[in-house]
Amino acid sequence: MPLIARPVSLAQARRIWIAGQRLNEREPFGTGPDATRRAIEHLGYVQIDTINVIERSHHHILYSRIPNYSRADLHRGQTIDKTVFEYWTHALAYVPVRDLRFFIGDMQEFRRNPMKWFGDVTDADVNRMVRQIRQGGAISIRDIDDEPVEKTHPWASRKPSKAALQRAFFDGRLAISERVGMVKTYELLDRHFAWEERPRAATDRQVIEYMLDRALRSQGIVSIESVYHTHARFRPALQKLIDRRVRNKTLVPVELEAAGKTAHWAAPETLDARPEPSSLTHILSPFDPLIIQRKRLRHFFDYDHLFEAYVPKARRKFGYFTLPVLVGDEIVAALDLKTDRAAGRLLIQSWHWLERARPRIHKPVIEEELQRFERFQLGRSEK
């Protein structure tokens, strides 16, 4: 007999998702270097992006969950403690080293079928670059003097050596052993981790279980799309895994308000927990895990985030790099911010109230959060 779906309102769903993201607590992961590791392990990934009109996304995402976050802690985790590494999830991201075996299969596939946006780099080019690092040690792109070439793909590099480094990174021969700003240092993957033997690649079934467990941990209520995000090839097997867990009663179907034909599931204990509304305010990165899945965001929060960094200025509605503002369990404003580092201040380019906003109530708490946010942007510690 099929389980009866448990009804969940959107208000409840938002609270569950916010709790899954640990945005309902001020210091859910504690403080210090280990907090960074714990945060990335819980979330599963932290997206990296180059835009820096404010602090870059990977630091911003961690700051939202670690009030006294230090950029040096992420550097330590990647380069010294080696508890996190960079790899491709739905984008380039920091991932826990404990999960590395779930990505080795992707590395092997990239080696068999290199992506077109590496340009015209050849196997010989890549082998030569790997050999140079094996013999001479880790290098960054700044250590190589190339003559630029014409791009053969919009995402390709104009420096052949950079394309060779990137291809060897994607196929698992190289690791990004250090990042200073956006300058990456490449080292042999096995040497970076001092492995005598590389971990065995997870099976497809183990990868699917990992993806589902990661989503349940960080989202609370999941759909097929929210689990695989950009890995559509796993959809049939993922559905079978969910069906099996429903039969085992470790997952239950959720009748989510206004979900239409999109099915959702959750662990029974997640629904039984019924988290209270959050009292916190967060100025979030557009690459935050709460924001990045736009379809899910629209359903749960009735909010369409506009990412207009690549939109011509005359056609922008909100601004170049708009940040959604979460107050409690509602997104109530969108702020276009810019850090003037020379002047030592945070600039509000534009402030947009959304439909659910109550400006008289929300403006004071957002202004208070903006002061804290400015201190983070300028590298000033909390008092």
Image (spheres, grey):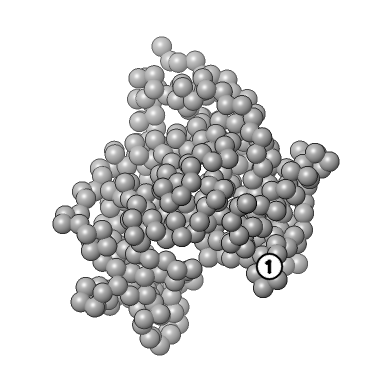
Direction front: furthest residue: 383
Left or right side of 207 for 374: right
Let me know if residue 207 appears in the view.
Answer: yes
User: Which amino acid is tagged 1?
Assistant: Gly
Residue at 26% across, 58% down? 193
Q: Position of residue 150 (x, y in %)?
A: 45, 82
Let me know if residue 124 appears in the view.
Answer: no
Q: Position of residue 25 (x, y in %)?
A: 57, 37
Direction top: furthest residue: 1
- Image quarter where the N terminus lies is top left
What is the secondary structure assignment of the residue under circle 1? loop
Residue at 36% across, 82% down? 144
Residue at 61% across, 33% down? 14
Pick the front one: 11 or 253: 11
Residue 8 vertical position relative to residue 104 in the rendered view, above or below: above
Residue 329 vertical position relative to residue 139 in the rendered view, above or below: above
Left or right side of 201 for 276: right
Quarter of the figure with residue 106: bottom left
Quarter of the figure with residue 313: bottom right
Direction bottom: furthest residue: 147
The residue carrying mark 1 is 344
Mark 1 surroundings within 10 Å by alpha-carbon count, few (fewer than 14), some (14 through 19), many (20 or more):
few
Q: Position of residue 129 (x, y in %)?
A: 27, 76
Direction right: furthest residue: 360
Pick the front one: 286 or 69: 69
Residue at 33% across, 56% down? 82
Pick the front one: 134 or 230: 134
Residue 100 vertical position relative to residue 7 in the rendered view, above or below: below
Q: Position of residue 44 (x, y in %)?
A: 42, 45
